[in-house]
Amino acid sequence: MPIQLTMKFRRHQRQNNFRVNLTPLIDTVFLLLIFFMMTTTFNRESQLNIDLPEASGEHASQQDDVIRIIINGQGEYAINDVDHSLINTQLDTLKRALKEAAGDLENPPLLLSADENAPHHAVMKAMEAARDLGFVRLRFEAQQRPDNGNE
């Protein structure tokens, strides 16, 4: 009698094991994010044209007790005399010079005279020195525009 061998194959039930590996996709997205963060510039150029005004009107009366802070185009300071500039542009040096110029005056009027090319931070530093010393009477000096007869 011949032996009959029968093999019983198991049928695997197919499950929906379809999976997408998201790791390469996430890596790619992070690389793109880093690339755009590193190559993007966040500086926005000013798109406004600003014409600074010139002063017109009467000259202010000169007072003897006015302390004049002069700022040249390089941001250097002088007190009351253009020819005698301060040794440096440090805030403490400017404060000491203002105290010395004020003498016994408690709140003398200050006249800030800045060159048109003076750096903005130099003007702000002069205003900060005046504020720190308690000087609140601050005026700005401007050049009178030439009259062309257009008024």
Image (cartoon, grey):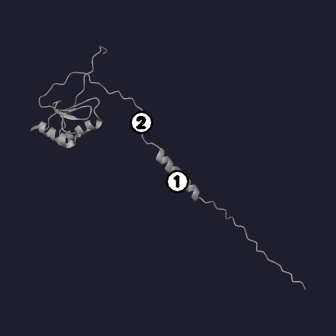
Label 1 close to label 2 by CB (< 8 Å): no
Residue 30's label in the rendered image is 1
Question: In what quadrant of the picture does the N terminus appear?
Answer: bottom right
**How many labels were placed on the picture?**
2
Q: Residue furthest right?
A: 1
Q: Quadrant of residue 27?
A: bottom right
Residue at left offset 20%, top offset 22%? 59
Percent x, y of residue 118 = 27, 32
Residue 45's label in the rendered image is 2
In terms of secondary structure, where does tag 1 sit?
helix
In terms of secondary structure, where does tag 2 sit?
loop
Q: Quadrant of residue 122?
A: top left
Q: Give the mark nearest the N terminus, 1 or 2.
A: 1
* Tag 1: amino acid: Phe
Between marks 1 and 2, how big is the CA–CA gap?
29 Å
Judging depth in this view, the residue of 48 and 84 nearest the camera is: 84
Residue at left offset 29%, top offset 35%? 119
Percent x, y of residue 52 = 32, 27
Residue 100's label in the rendered image is none
Query: Counting other residues with Cα less than 10 Å from the Cα at mark 1, is it few (<14), some (14-19), or many (20 or more)?
Result: few
Residue at left offset 36%, top offset 29%? 50
* Tag 2: amino acid: Glu
